[in-house]
Amino acid sequence: MSSGSKTALITGSGQNIGRGIANQLALAGFNIIVNGSRNQDAAEAVAAEVRAHGVEALVAMGNVGIKAEAEALAKAGLDHFGKIDVLVNNAAIRPHGPFLDMNDDEWQKVMDVDLNAAIWLSRMILPGMIDNGWGRIISFSGMNAQRGYPGASAVSVAKHAVWGLTKAFAVEFGINGITANIIAPGTFPPNDADIANDTKFSALLKANPSGRLGRTEDIGAMVVYLCSKNGGFVNGQMLQINGGVVMQF
């Protein structure tokens, strides 16, 4: 690894959006820490794709919703690469069900994966970013958090909290050359989704002003920009990538 190369940890990067981000950052010259919680074969496949772009990849499995595993994941990356320059908090769970049917354990699981994982990982990684005078923390919100959806109260709460954490980080660590931003994706079907024959996706497609649904490269391109020299003055922002379905005011 060259001394000038940077390393990115992307949680939940064994498939879909996380996989797309891993490949886009690898194309931009970043070494990648690929993370998954269950399917190691999928994570290894992403790592092979990353290495094909001429950079280094490390597979570090672990459930980021368990504090010890999140910390072990960050430590594995730090031990292997010596530093982590970019943290992408992509892993999330989105259970659906009535608020009154959700027990404390189910609620806490959402908080741990969708919110606390970002806190635990940031505590591990931020000191090195501060020492190096450069870092990027990119998290994810979503339309659930912005508009509110029935059956998604825990997700809405967790994603709102990550938005607050992002703004706090932007203010506290901007002086250290570290930016914190949050991406709010619209509808991004899985890679293997049959959009034309899926009632839900076909309806969302018709409702989208852009005439299409999201592709993983849409998110990856934004992450690459935020991690570039030109993206260094974008800090504390929520970036909508949804084709115009939800607009800020």
Image (cartoon, rainbow, N blue to C red):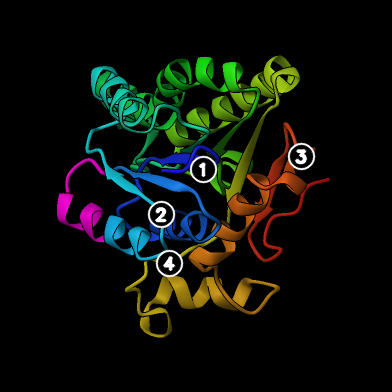
- Residue beneath disc 2: 55
**Residues at badges 4 and 2 in contact (C-beta under 8 Å)?**
no
The residue carrying pointer 1 sits among few (fewer than 14), some (14 to 19) or many (20 or more) residues within 10 Å by Cα, namely few
Q: Which residue is mark 1?
A: 5
Ranked by sequence position, the earlier of labels 2 and 3 is: 2
Mark 4 vs mark 1: give the one in front.
1
Query: Callout 4: few (<14), some (14-19), or many (20+) C-alpha neighbours within 10 Å?
Result: some
Cβ atoms under marks 1 and 2 closer than 8 Å: yes
Q: Is residue 55 above or below residue 85?
A: below
Task: Report the amino acid beneath label 3.
Answer: Val
Q: Quadrant of residue 64?
A: top left
**Rendering coords of residue 117 (x, y %):** 39, 25
**Which one is in front, 12 or 134?**
134
Alpha-carbon distance for marks 4 and 3?
A: 27 Å
For mark 3, what is the residue? 234
Q: Which residues are magenta?
A: 36-45
Pick the front one: 68 or 158: 68
SS under mark 4: loop
Q: Give how far across and how far down residue 43 sits, in percent.
A: 24, 52
Of callouts 1 and 3, the N-terminal one: 1
Give the mark toward the camera: 4 or 3.
Answer: 3
Q: CA distance from mark 4 to mark 2?
A: 28 Å
